[in-house]
Amino acid sequence: MIKTFLLPIVFSLSFFVTNAQDDWGSYVIEKEKGIMAITLNYRYALTKPNYKNLVLVGKRTNKCYKNGAPNAQGLEEIYNFSDAVANELNKLSKKNRLVGIVTYLCSGFDAYYIKDTTNVRQKIDSLYQKKFSNSKNYLVIKRDKRWDYFKEVLYPKDDSENFFMSQDLLNQMYFEGADLSIKRKIKHYFYFKKDKNRQSFLDKIKTVDFKVDSLNFKKENNFPYELQIHRENELYPTFMAELTKVLSTFALINKGYYDGWGIEPESIE
C-alpha cells in the first residue's frame, strides 16, 4: 500500500476510444532525455484486430513543467488535438483502434492501428494546416503487421507486480511536475509475525543505510510487529521496482511482509 497525502490529479479521457472490453493502464519509465509516461490498452496484449498499419500522431506544447510533463493548459491543448485527429480518422474509417498514448518532453502522441490508410496522410496534413499550424506536429504512417510498436515501445519491459506497485504515485508526481531524479526521504512499511523476525530484518537492513522511524505493536493484527524505516533515494521507476522487489523478498524471508512506501507531501515538488 503506497502511503501519501497527495491530492488527486484529474485527467480528461474524452479522446479514448472506449468500450466494455477496454483495459487502460498507465506507467512512467525513464528514457534517455527524461521521463516518459505511457497509457495503453492492455486488451490488445491478448487479442489484436487484423489492422496492420501504425499511425502515430502527436503535438508539442510549450505549456509544460521542467520535467517535460504538460501542465493543465498543455494537457488541454493535447486533448483538443487528440479529439480532432480521432474525429478525422473515424470519418475515414471506423476500422481503427487507439492502442496507446505517450507523453514525453512536452509532447503528446497517440498510437493507432488502422485497417486502411488510404487518404490518411492527406486528411491529417490538412487538419494540421487548418487547426494546428502554430505548433510542431507529428505524423508517422508505417506498415506494422506484427504490432512491433505496441510490443516494443508501448508495452512495459517489466510487467511485474513490483514495477506497478509504485506506478500510481510516480505517474501522479510526474504529471504534477515533480523531478523524479531528486533524492527524497522515502518511508517504507513492514509487518512481522514475531519481534525476533523484525529484529533479524532490522539487523540486516541497517547495513545498507536505512534508518528506523518507528517500532509499533498492533495486537489486533495477524502480523502485529510494525516497522517503519526510511532512506533517501531517487524515484526512478526501474530503481523503485528493484528496491521494492528486494524489500518484499527480504521481509518474506523474515516471516513478514512489505506494505509499500510513501513520501511526505512537502517532498513532492
Image: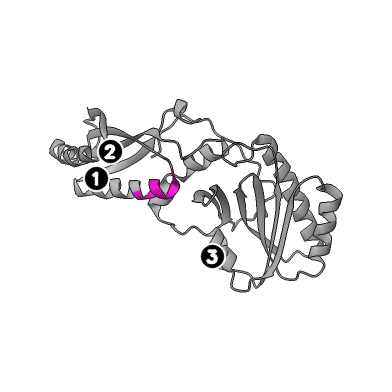
Residue 21 horizontal side relative to residue 188, left or right: right
* Magenta stretch: includes residue 240: yes
Mark 2: give few (<14), some (14-19) or many (20+) Cα within 10 Å.
Answer: many
Vertical position of residue 25 compared to residue 233: above or below: below
Q: Which mark is residue 251?
A: 1
Q: Quadrant of residue 183?
A: top left
Instruction: Name the spot of residue 214 as percent of width and height, x first.
Output: 25, 27
The answer to whether residue 249 is seen in the rendering is: yes
Q: Are marks 2 and 1 in contact (CB under 8 Å)?
A: yes
Q: Residue at x 23, y 28 (%)?
A: 216
Mark 1: give few (<14), some (14-19) or many (20+) Cα within 10 Å.
Answer: many
The answer to whether residue 42 is seen in the rendering is: no
Q: Which mark is residue 23?
A: none
Q: Which mark is residue 190?
A: 2
Main SS, magenta region, reads helix
Question: Between residues 268 and 12, which one lies in front from this camera angle?
Answer: 268
Label 1 or label 3, whichever comes before in sequence order: 3
* Magenta stretch: includes residue 230: no
What quarter of the picture does the N terminus occupy? top left
Instruction: Name the spot of residue 52 as percent of width and height, x first.
Output: 66, 72
Residue range in magenta is: 236-242
Q: Which mark is residue 151?
A: 3
Question: Between residues 87 and 176, which one lies in front from this camera angle?
Answer: 176
For the residues marked 2 and 3, what is the alpha-carbon distance in whole angstroms? Answer: 35 Å
For the residues marked 2 and 1, what is the alpha-carbon distance in whole angstroms? Answer: 7 Å
